[in-house]
Amino acid sequence: KNQVEQSPQSLIILEGKNCTLQCNYTVSPFSNLRWYKQDTGRGPVSLTIMTFSENTKSNGRYTATLDADTKQSSLHITASQLSDSASYICVVSWTTSGTYKYIFGTGTRLKVLA
Amino acid sequence: DTGVSQDPRHKITKRGQNVTFRCDPISEHNRLYWYRQTLGQGPEFLTYFQNEAQLEKSRLLSDRFSAERPKGSFSTLEIQRTEQGDSAMYLCASSSGGQQPYEQYFGPGTRLTVT
């Protein structure tokens, strides 16, 4: 069964600190993995997308890694800011019968405190 | 504004009433998706259009739910005889076509509360 699991469920850190969020998946055949940031009451916004051949990608203070062998991804946030408080959702896509499908993780809720 | 828009942003309705939501995708995108998201969960796929054709529907989409995209542009999602369990955020996303899974751009969502 295709699944995406994220950890931790929630995280509280102080402003300026770094943190790492985890995403494990059991999806086959794997196509790509995306990390989204979702502010409360808003739609998700894409941070990074990685295909099978990519193992790291950065977007400002956000760096995503992908290990396709162990089926794990992480999102590292450097020098956190109050505006980073949001839910971070991992989305994995796969193909079946020529159609792309998406499965969303439940997200990690990050709270950055001053 | 060239992003995905949804209307209304919030809807409160009484159980048993019908509601309809609208999504306007990014104009050049031919793919449109509807998702449902409950508190503390990730979005769950409901249905997907390529142009005006509804190509896939989730088992979550019961007979009370119907979606249309009549001219391949905007889409509507209707829920008939609403139930309290329908309370959720309904998200719309659009993407361009082609063989690659192009990025999905999400709208702000419509929050439905059924009392």
Image: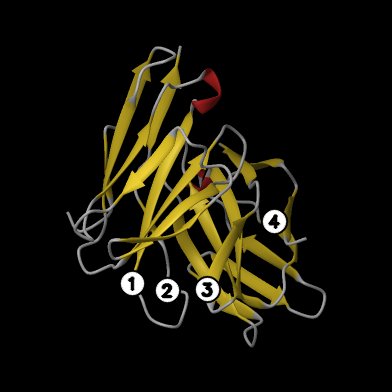
Read off the chain for label 1.
B
Q: Residue A99: which disc?
A: 3
Local packing at callout 2 (Cα closer than 10 Å; few below 14, some 14-19, many 20+) is: some
Q: CA distance from mark 2 to mark 4?
A: 24 Å
Q: Residue A23: which disc?
A: none
Of marks 2 and 4, the one in the foreground: 2
Read off the chain for label 2.
B
Read off the chain for label 3.
A
State if disc 3 and disc 2 touch (CB < 8 Å).
no
**Amino acid, disc 4:** Leu
Q: Quadrant of the N terminus of chain B?
A: bottom left
Local packing at callout 1 (Cα closer than 10 Å; few below 14, some 14-19, many 20+) is: some
Q: CA distance from mark 1 to mark 3?
A: 14 Å
**Amino acid, disc 3:** Thr
Residue pushed farthest bottom? Answer: A53
Q: CA distance from mark 2 to mark 3?
A: 12 Å
Question: Is B106 or A61 nearer to us in this picture?
Answer: B106
